[in-house]
Amino acid sequence: MKPNIFTVRMLSKTRTSGFSLKFSSLSLNGNFNSLLSLAFLAMLVAFGSCQRKTTTTTSNISRKAKAKEVDYEYFEARGRVKYENGDNRERFVVDIRMQKDSIIWLSLRSGTGIEGARALIQKDSIFFINRLDKQYMMYSFDELDGKVNFPFSLEMLQSIIVGNPVVFEGGTALVDKVDNYKVLSQLLDNLKVQFWVSRTSSKLEKITVEDINSRNELNINYTDFQKVDRTILPFEINSVMSYYDETGVKDANIELKYSKAEMPQEQLKFPFKILPRHKRVYIKFDNDQE
């Protein structure tokens, strides 16, 4: 059986133009079990391109834009994910468990309830298991940093999942009032990053990332805010990645709708085991040698 190969050509760093968002060559060979890698890499690489050898913080934007953040020690949720990119359309159910600043655990299932994939993301590494094809992927963040020219961040992904804003140190941050929003803008190399915080609810409602040179864009929208324990959480997250190729403008959409979410007081479990029968497979990056 031929192993799955994930091809990633999404981000590059050039000597003259700094960072750029590239989505046009994103491709995937595999079934719904592989969508975990695709969705994760698409969002994290695109949004993570704003960061280069810097640290992320949420406290700065809270002070500047007065955003109300989701505070938790443990987070647990279930949701439905829709992914669309041209003719490629997938649907699956995801279970998410997190310990803040420590770990993210994900389990992907088909509509019939069969688990196809599982992921474990720690502060220094990520692991994927394709359970049906008995395959796995394993990368340290340092390895991925060398491949795609930016450091991955567990904290950044956790913030995106719960709808907390992230500010990147090292860039100038400005806050403006636009209609009913406080907009915190940062310019890092070619990338214009904006966080749109509602002046009514003080919740982050959208994130926009624009590559000034290529005009590629990433838009993340948070809607359907509901009360969970003593905080307000967005139950719908919709990400649209717009890019240009030889045929014109294309869109890749990732939609996550939570059916339930909670912040349990007791410690969560994160079961994850790579078995000897699992075969390791690799992401093929654009800069890999043939």
Image (tube, rainbow, N blue to C red):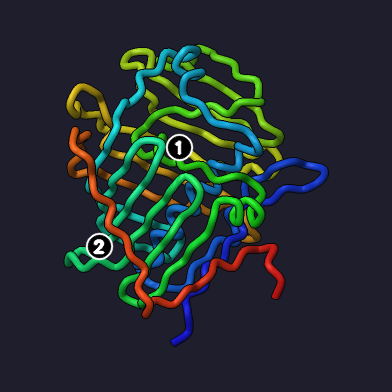
Whether residue 89 is visible here, answered yes or no, is yes
Q: Amino acid at mark 1?
A: Glu
> Marks 2 and 1, Cα distance to the nearest angstrom?
25 Å
Q: Is residue 287 left or right of residue 110?
A: right
Q: Is residue 218 above or below residue 252?
A: above
Q: Secondary structure at mark 2?
A: strand
- Where does the image place residue 160, in percent across and percent down from the top left? 41, 37
> Relative to 145, is 207 on the left or the right?
left
Q: Amino acid at mark 2?
A: Arg
Q: Which mark is in front, 2 or 1?
A: 1
Q: Is residue 248 visible?
A: no
Residue located at (37% from left, 66% from top):
129
Count of marks placed on residues:
2
Foreground residue, 232 or 102?
102
Residue at 62% over, 50% down: 145
Q: Position of residue 44 (x, y in %)?
A: 50, 47
Instruction: Tell me which residue sits at (19%, 33%) in the image.
Output: 265
Residue 155 tag number: 1
The image shows residue 175, relative to residue 152, as above or below, that is above
Tag of residue 109: 2
For residue 230, above or below residue 50: above
Residue 21 lies, in percent from the top left, at 62, 46
